[in-house]
Amino acid sequence: MSIFVDVIDDVRDNASASIEKAGSHQNKPSLMLLHGWGLNGAVWDNVRHFLAPHYKLLIVDLPGHGYSRDEPLTTLDAAADAIANAMPHPMHILGWSLGGQIALTVAYRHAALVDKLVLVSTTPRFVVADNWPYGKKAAVLDDFAKRLKTHYAATIRGFLALQTMHQPNARSTVAELQTAMSARGEPSALSLQAGLNILRTSDVREQLATVPHASLVIQGDHDALTSEAAAHWLAGHLPNANYALMPHAAHAPFLSHRELFLGHVIKHLR
């Protein structure tokens, strides 16, 4: 599977390519950025210029999204393997939401390719279960899946609004997310449904013990999609993790609280 990776290897932020494997150009550490469901790599435009002086960036469009739209999203394992195939050497991975679950999956399936992890608004299991009280009801995802088929635009707008709930600058944050979503074209309808199915069925709790990498779990305390309790549990069950709770932040803290977010990330990766 060939996915699109935006390669930024200097502060001029001017290099991009559609590639299977990204080459290594500088001595700076490499950092791969994985977006969440329904978005694409353009969602990182708010922070890429601040990270580029410190890291060689590899900004991925996940299968079925953005410029990787024609590559089907099927399973969590297949997505992780596609990401690993675009990693020519060990690097840090920052994953947001679904991208965080994929980052964890890369870490336990391809451990030698991962240096450090940053997991943003990430839960090891999205749906509630008898032994997992920190998730959403499956009916929430079922409703999303049903409405996507008939009211695509309204469903996506509602999903974006959920990501900024309780934010004082919610309108501008939603606008940034909408801009990012449209920057590289709408994701594949089949892949959107597949992504919802991944969120409905994925559970990486048992694999966490096999992820020894130094990890940072970042969570907003106003997140309406992933709970503070789930993120705290995740940090507590990874063998080598720190936890950063961001007050007043919702599901996209890199947009709403950029400076604080970047401070946490750069400190951890150093």
Image: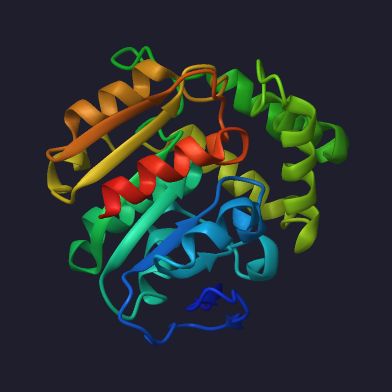
Q: Quadrant of residue 27?
A: bottom left
Residue 200 horizontal/vertical position (percent)? 50, 33
Residue 16 horizontal/vertical position (percent)? 60, 80
Q: Quadrant of residue 138?
A: top right
* Along the viewing direction, whichever of 200 and 26 lies nearer the viewer: 26
Q: Residue at x 42, y 28 (%)?
A: 219
Q: Give left or right: position of 212 versus 255.
A: left
Q: Give left or right: position of 195 versus 9.
A: right
Q: Quadrant of residue 148?
A: top right
Res. 227 visible in picture: yes
Res. 3 visible in picture: no
Q: Residue at x 64, y 29 (%)?
A: 163
* Along the viewing direction, whichever of 196 and 255 lies nearer the viewer: 255
* Along the viewing direction, whichever of 52 and 40 lies nearer the viewer: 52
Work out whether 9 lies above or below 60.
below
Q: Residue at x 62, y 21 (%)?
A: 140
Residue 112 horizontal/vertical position (percent)? 18, 67
* Along the viewing direction, whichever of 78 and 14 lies nearer the viewer: 14
Work out whether 196 lies above or below 213.
above
> Which quadrant of the rendered structure holds the C terminus?
bottom left
Q: Give left or right: position of 139 versus 22.
A: right
Q: According to the image, what is the colour scheme of the structure?
A: rainbow
Q: Residue at x 37, y 40 (%)?
A: 264
Q: Give left or right: position of 204 versus 171.
A: left
Residue 199 horizontal/vertical position (percent)? 50, 37
